[in-house]
Image (spheres, grey):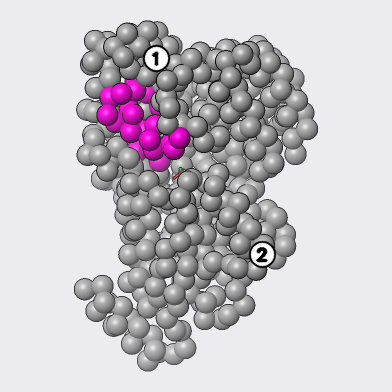
Amino acid sequence: MKLTTKLLSASAIVAASSVSAVELEVTHWWTSGGEAAAVSEFAKAFDATEHTWVDGAIAGSGGTARPIIISRILGGDPMGATQLNHGRQAEELIEAGLLLDLTDVAEAEGWKDIVNPSSLLDSCTVDGRIYCAPVNIHSWQWIWLSHQAYADAGTDVPTNWDEFVASAPALEAAGKIPLAMGQQPWQSSGAFGVMAVAIAGVDAWSQVTVDKNPDAVMGPEYTKVFEAAANARAFAANSNVQDWNQATNLVITGQAGAQIMGDWAQGEFQVAGQVAGEDYTCLPGLGVNEVISTGGDAFYFPVQDDPEVEAAQKELAALLLSPEVQVAFNLAKGSLPIRGDIDLMAANDCMKKGLEILAAGNILPDGNQTLSPDTSAQLEDLMVEFWNDPSITAADAQQRYADIIASAD
Ligand code: GAL
């Protein structure tokens, strides 16, 4: 079937004119079960054209993959296309003229009219030119709770952060890990950001993360966040896993009560055959503050200086935003589509909640959109230290966080 489609479209195009089949290497860090299922939707759609998707998955999540991707592009070994989080990660590559300008594709496809929220396209835009194709909205602002773990502990599934904190001793008594947390630096840093939005509130969070005001870090709202993080550190003390999806698996299997993680975790529950509301509960904004951050993933296309490759790159860019591909990909990924004009009837309860929050306009930018990669890396380093060393007090971490924010760009 696939081959037939390919042959048909290839011959149609050869007959029509000059486009030829290209093998396009696409790099990304989607290697967990749910992520692999999602990216295969892109590959399938691209393989149904005359071109071929050459999968360049890089194991170990964004923290490992991004430096490899960026150094390949800088070092003159560019791939055909690559995932990055849109926002500030590609700034230097764009300034160096290494990424393909997609403005003509964006105009032909009407991206300005369909991409919602428009901040996703703004994050692809530098000096009025568009350099990336946004493919989803991923939000960090979620906690995932295992019904099995709470049933085993004989207590109700929490409906907010305070109830979660109160339930931790019962979980521990039942031999559970209250909070699953992997060791990759971005995980503890991301979880801290979620606690900040929920506990300090959106205003204080914006003063810190958008305005970069160190005084706000030292203020009373953030003091509560650092104290909550010290609590969370104790709840996660026995969570000896590395990758984020291994931590999700602790929740799926009922070994842990909860995980604070972005909504890509949904892909893992789905692959495991779990049902939102039955096997697990998701609480946006830790059940305290229903808001979602609207970062996500985007594809960038390194300049190749080959018109045939460039044509295939642009074809892929357009395809990634097409309605059918958006539905298939996002349902598998657990993310929300970047276009508001498509039907997500099949969305599960958690995605529906996300869509409602998006429609109500309760959205925040993502840290990748507001902080430079250098600042994000410094915050990640601090959080890894804090999370692994209980002798670092909440007050120590608060001071060091403020120092980093004071010099953030
Ligand atoms: C994020 C990315 C998501 C997700 C996650 C874990 O950076 O935006 O798509 O899969 O990493 O790998």
**Is the shortest distance between ligand 1 and the CB of mark 2 under 8 Å?**
no
- What residue did someone put label 1 on? 164
In this rendering, position of residue 87 left or right of residue 288: right
Residue extent of the magenta highlight: 242-266
Q: Residue 92, how many percent across, how many down? A: 70, 55
Amino acid found under the numbered disc labelled 2: Gly
Q: Residue 156, how many percent across, how many down? A: 27, 13
Q: Nearer the viewer, residue 283 or 342?
A: 283
Seen at 36% across and 74% down, the residue is: 49
Amino acid found under the numbered disc labelled 1: Phe
Q: Nearer the viewer, residue 200 or 57?
A: 57
- Asked if residue 232 can be seen in this view, the reply is no
Depicted 224 relative to depicted 52: above or below: above
Seen at 44% across and 84% down, the residue is: 20
- What residue did someone put label 2 on? 75
The C terminus, quarter of image: top right
CA gap, disc 2 to disc 1? 48 Å
Q: Residue 230, how many percent across, how many down? A: 55, 15
Depicted 265 relative to depicted 297: above or below: above
Q: Nearer the viewer, residue 330 or 116?
A: 330
Seen at 36% across and 33% down, the residue is: 248
